[in-house]
Amino acid sequence: MFCSKCGKEIRDDAVICIHCGCKVEGRDLNPGDKKSWVVSLLLCLFLGGIGAHRFYTGYIGIGVAQLLTLGGCGIWAFIDLICILCNTYKAADGSELQK
Protein backbone atom coordinates (compact mmCIF):
# COMPACT_ATOMS: atom_id res chain seq x y z
CA MET A 1 0.00 0.00 0.00
CA PHE A 2 1.19 3.54 -0.76
CA CYS A 3 0.51 6.84 1.01
CA SER A 4 -1.81 9.10 -0.99
CA LYS A 5 0.07 12.21 0.22
CA CYS A 6 3.78 11.38 -0.19
CA GLY A 7 3.58 8.23 -2.34
CA LYS A 8 5.90 6.14 -0.18
CA GLU A 9 5.15 2.55 0.71
CA ILE A 10 3.38 1.93 4.04
CA ARG A 11 1.96 -1.12 5.79
CA ASP A 12 -1.50 -2.30 4.73
CA ASP A 13 -2.91 -1.82 8.24
CA ALA A 14 -1.35 1.62 8.78
CA VAL A 15 -3.48 4.45 10.10
CA ILE A 16 -0.77 7.12 9.79
CA CYS A 17 2.03 7.30 7.23
CA ILE A 18 5.37 6.88 9.02
CA HIS A 19 7.12 9.00 6.39
CA CYS A 20 5.00 12.16 6.23
CA GLY A 21 2.78 11.75 9.31
CA CYS A 22 -0.48 12.18 7.41
CA LYS A 23 -3.60 10.20 8.24
CA VAL A 24 -4.28 7.38 5.77
CA GLU A 25 -7.57 8.11 4.03
CA GLY A 26 -10.46 5.88 5.00
CA ARG A 27 -8.90 4.87 8.34
CA ASP A 28 -10.11 6.00 11.77
CA LEU A 29 -7.54 7.03 14.36
CA ASN A 30 -9.81 5.87 17.22
CA PRO A 31 -12.26 3.33 15.78
CA GLY A 32 -13.52 2.34 19.23
CA ASP A 33 -14.37 5.93 20.15
CA LYS A 34 -17.40 6.32 17.87
CA LYS A 35 -20.66 7.40 19.41
CA SER A 36 -23.67 5.12 19.05
CA TRP A 37 -26.67 6.16 16.98
CA VAL A 38 -29.05 4.18 19.20
CA VAL A 39 -27.71 5.71 22.43
CA SER A 40 -27.94 9.20 20.93
CA LEU A 41 -31.50 8.55 19.77
CA LEU A 42 -32.64 7.24 23.16
CA LEU A 43 -30.94 10.07 25.06
CA CYS A 44 -32.57 12.63 22.78
CA LEU A 45 -35.96 10.95 23.01
CA PHE A 46 -36.07 10.62 26.79
CA LEU A 47 -33.64 13.31 28.03
CA GLY A 48 -33.54 15.70 25.09
CA GLY A 49 -35.03 18.51 27.13
CA ILE A 50 -31.89 18.64 29.25
CA GLY A 51 -29.48 18.12 26.33
CA ALA A 52 -28.16 14.70 27.40
CA HIS A 53 -27.55 13.66 23.78
CA ARG A 54 -25.45 16.79 23.23
CA PHE A 55 -23.24 16.00 26.21
CA TYR A 56 -22.89 12.39 24.99
CA THR A 57 -21.78 13.42 21.50
CA GLY A 58 -19.29 16.02 22.74
CA TYR A 59 -21.23 19.27 22.28
CA ILE A 60 -20.75 20.46 25.87
CA GLY A 61 -21.52 24.15 25.26
CA ILE A 62 -24.72 23.45 23.35
CA GLY A 63 -25.63 20.84 25.98
CA VAL A 64 -25.41 23.49 28.70
CA ALA A 65 -27.55 25.86 26.60
CA GLN A 66 -30.16 23.13 26.12
CA LEU A 67 -30.04 22.32 29.82
CA LEU A 68 -30.69 25.95 30.76
CA THR A 69 -33.50 26.42 28.21
CA LEU A 70 -35.04 22.94 28.60
CA GLY A 71 -34.13 22.04 25.05
CA GLY A 72 -35.32 25.37 23.69
CA CYS A 73 -38.77 24.63 25.18
CA GLY A 74 -38.63 21.25 23.47
CA ILE A 75 -38.22 22.63 19.94
CA TRP A 76 -34.43 22.30 19.85
CA ALA A 77 -34.60 18.73 21.18
CA PHE A 78 -37.28 17.86 18.60
CA ILE A 79 -35.12 19.18 15.75
CA ASP A 80 -32.16 17.16 17.05
CA LEU A 81 -34.38 14.07 17.21
CA ILE A 82 -35.33 14.53 13.54
CA CYS A 83 -31.65 15.00 12.61
CA ILE A 84 -30.67 11.83 14.45
CA LEU A 85 -33.47 9.86 12.79
CA CYS A 86 -32.47 11.19 9.35
CA ASN A 87 -28.81 10.31 10.08
CA THR A 88 -27.57 13.87 9.53
CA TYR A 89 -26.51 14.42 13.16
CA LYS A 90 -22.75 14.10 13.73
CA ALA A 91 -20.57 13.95 16.82
CA ALA A 92 -18.53 17.01 17.82
CA ASP A 93 -15.40 15.58 16.21
CA GLY A 94 -17.22 15.37 12.86
CA SER A 95 -17.61 11.61 12.84
CA GLU A 96 -20.89 9.97 11.96
CA LEU A 97 -22.84 8.10 14.61
CA GLN A 98 -22.24 4.36 14.50
CA LYS A 99 -25.30 2.26 13.73
Image (cartoon, rainbow, N blue to C red):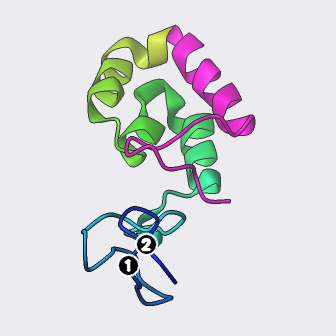
**Residue drawn at 56 percent across, 49 percent down:** 96
* 85 with respect to 18 (left or right): right
Quarter occupied by the C terminus: bottom right
User: At which x and y percent is residue 9?
Assistant: 41, 85
Farthest residue to the right: give it. Answer: 86
Q: Secondary structure at mark 2?
A: loop
Q: Amino acid at mark 1?
A: Lys
| 63 with respect to 61 (left or right) | right
Please provide the residue range marked out in magenta.
Answer: 73-99
In this view, the residue in front, 84 or 68, is 84
First reached walking from the N terminus: tag 1 or tag 2: 2
What's the residue at 33%, 75% (across, down)? 17
* Horizontal relation, residue 76 to residue 18: left or right: right
Percent x, y of residue 54: 42, 36
Q: Quadrant of residue 29?
A: bottom left
Residue 87 within the magenta-colored segment of the rendering = yes
- On whether residue 96 falls in the magenta region, the answer is yes
Whether residue 74 appears in this view of the structure is no
Q: Residue at x 38, y 46 (%)?
A: 93
Q: Which mark is residue 85?
A: none
- Label disc, if present, on residue 3 of the rendered structure: 2
> Which label belongs to residue 8?
1
Residue type marked 2? Cys
Vertically, is 76 above or below 38? above
